[in-house]
Amino acid sequence: MNAIEVTGLVRRYGDFTAVNDFDLTLATGECVAMLGPNGAGKTTTVEILEGYRRRDAGSVSVLGVDPAHANRAWRQRIGIVLQSADDLLYATVREALEHFARYYDRPRGAADVAALVGLEEKIDQRIGHLSGGQRRRLDVALGVVGQPELLFLDEPTTGFDPEARRVFWQLIERLKSEGVTILLTTHYLDEADALADRVIVINRGKKVADTTPADLGSRNEGRIVVRWRENDAVHEEVTSTPAAFIASLSARVGGEVPGLEVLRPTLEEAYLELVEESK
Amino acid sequence: MTNLPALYVRRIRFEVRLLLRDRSTVMFSMLLPVFLLAIFGSVFNNQKLSYGVSFAQYFVAGMLASSLLYSSFQLLAIDIPAERINGTLKRLVGSPMPRSVYFVGKFGSSVFIYVLQAIVLLSLGHFAYHVHLPSASGRWVEFAWISVLGLVASSLLGIAFSSLARDGKSASAMAAPLVLFFQFTSGVYFIYANLPSWMQHVSTLFPLKWMAQAMRGVFLPRAYAHAEVAHSFELGRAALVLGLWTVIAALLCAFTFRWMSRDEN
């Protein structure tokens, strides 16, 4: 059975259609990244799936339950990491984890979860004294303390430095290997590339791509840039057959080509172009 | 299966522990009644009221009633909107916590603050301003039920009020003047029987007048009842009014309470 099945989802705020006929399927155990510019409808979609927001149309099934009629048994099985939280400032990491663990039937131990997110050394610190990245890791810890089958992560690494992001990715890899289904929204293409089995691009409430990160990156396979130096100037040629072009170039300049580079389109370029096209 | 009473106890302990670490809130809620008692007690204590009652004696009864409002109504009316903004409520709603746990936790922290305030007020009043404490156990039983009923009604009113404000700041700007208004018109800062009758009529409709009057029934000599407007402390009627407000507030909560901001549903 699929963990998430959404068809024809619509949500309007007054005249503004935030989510427009959106479909989504997540197989159990899959990790899917939802990408899109600010205001694309990512958070609205995710919060409908989490049971926070109502919808105007469409059918939604999350772990076999319509989130609009979520009950506590269903909440036992999902974990939520919201986009921003500024609560629990006066509690320590351990107190918060132990407190929330009590609401679940089969929780992880506070020390185990703290270690899982790399906060074992901060376990007795006040949450208000944590750095931005540590605070975010605590939010993830609170999201997984109940051992969810399905985890929602809404922009989990915004504001992380590159190293903290790598550490965070390892944590997600670990949850994936435990079989947790993950729906992640992010602004970072490299994050989607590193973590997701599938990437969904949403813009203006509509799905504009649903593919693997590799396929998204090779969308512009035919537009490879060859760059080289000749006569003190940098030259560029866009081609779909770089090897043939370089062979002829090499023949023309007589051997090695100075400053030779072959640039495949990045995931980021493919993404930006997609968003641009769907405007 | 969920053990609800155990979750209630845990939540109350968690709330109280975090509340105590928020020093500014604790200091403010402890010091305000102390300051007021010190000021009013010092300025007016030479005034003797009817039946030899000192102003401090009258004022302590009124301040205990005010404490019921401070510790529950005012605290919750400000705290809950702040927690709606900072993500506390959203996190709890997203967890499998039974929703009643949140409200029981809030009520528990109100009871805790009230007990502290009452101890501070009664000790300061007794030792610094010669406030006479009743020796008959029946009086303390009255004190207990008035306190419990007052806290239940005021907490529910605070929870209902919390849905009006957008955030903690605007809640504070709305709730604090309201409490002050009722203190002036309900016989806390001034002798109730001396107030203009329109003021008496207005405050008769609201809980504070009844809580203050019932507290006077506990802490003032029985004879002082003759100096009251109704020639009685009207404890039975106070219980009735507070019970009625409990029902009204509970209905308001049931129909208006919001776990999330209006633009977040």
Image: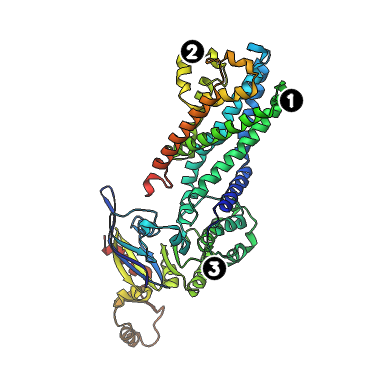
Which chain's residue wears label 3? A
Question: Which residue is disc 1 drawn over?
Answer: B127
What is the chain identity of the residue bearing mark 2?
A: B
Q: Nearer the viewer, residue B171 or B16?
A: B16
Image coordinates of residue A132 in percent, x first then y, are 54, 56
Category of crowding for the residue at label 1, using alpha-carbon neighbours closer than 10 angstroms: few (below 14), some (14–19), many (at least 20) = few
Q: Residue furthest right?
A: B127
Q: Is residue B10 left or right of residue A55?
A: right
The amino acid sitting under disc 3 is Val
Disc 3 secondary structure class: helix
Look at label 1 and name its amino acid: Phe
Disc on the earlier residue, 1 or 2: 1
Q: Which residue is mark 3?
A: A167
Q: Is residue A190 above or below residue B201?
A: below
Name the image quarter holding residue B117. top right
Report whether A218 appears left or right of B128. Answer: left
Q: Is residue A36 above or below residue A1?
A: above
Name the quadrant of the N terminus of chain A: bottom left
- Measuring from the top left, give residue B116's x and y in whole percent: 65, 36
Can you identify the residue that label 2 sits on? B196
Q: Position of residue B187 (x, y in %)?
A: 55, 20
Left or right? Give the position of B160 relative to A252. right
Name the colour scheme.
rainbow
Residue closer to the observer: B147 or A17: B147
